[in-house]
Image: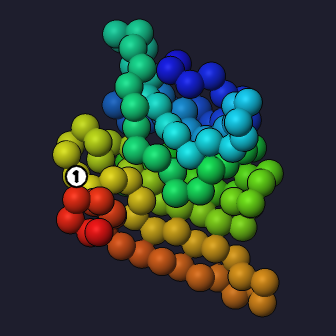
Amino acid sequence: MTSARSGHTATLLADGTVLVAGGSDATGALSSAERYDPLTDTWSPAPLVVMPRIGHTATLLASGLVLVGGGANAASGTMELYDPFSVQSGRAPAIVSVTALLQSGDALIVHGTGFNPENDA
């Protein structure tokens, strides 16, 4: 692993690689993610999660996307639909949608096709 962390998730993806997302290091909560390939015993960077998360959940969906939600930090009331393969395929970075629980009890859902810093500035 290129970034040591604790409080992260490890999700087995459909292609046999493992997505490791979020967690914390000595500086605090992380938004970084990495993929581990057990066949080659190598790590590669994965798209960032929107909110730095510690102690969250990550669930692989039938679509191949990963639902990342909650956490023991400021991200606790949010969820994001994450595409772990967007870097490999050259698509825009990973976030498909983000849901936040507002103080009123309502949910705010933001949906898009992703953010490409070169095209969406």
| Colouring scheme applied when the structure was drawn | rainbow
- Find numbered disc 1 in the image and state the secondary structure of the residue it sits on: loop
Q: Is residue 57 visible?
A: no
The residue at the point 40 percent across, 44 percent down is 47
Q: Nearer the viewer, residue 30 or 82?
A: 30
Q: Is residue 119 left or right of residue 30?
A: left
Residue 106 x %, y %: 70, 87
Residue 43 x %, y %: 42, 20
The residue at the point 70 percent across, 77 percent down is 101
Residue 102 x %, y %: 72, 82
Query: Residue 29 appears in which quarter of the rendering?
Result: top right
70 vs 9: above or below: below
Instruction: Give amino acid for label 1.
Output: Arg
The residue at the point 48 percent across, 77 percent down is 110
Q: Is residue 55 left or right of residue 33?
A: right
86 vs 24: above or below: below
The residue at the point 29 percent across, 42 percent down is 87
Residue 113 x %, y %: 30, 68
Kindly identify which residue carries mark 1.
91
Q: Nearer the viewer, residue 118 or 32?
A: 118
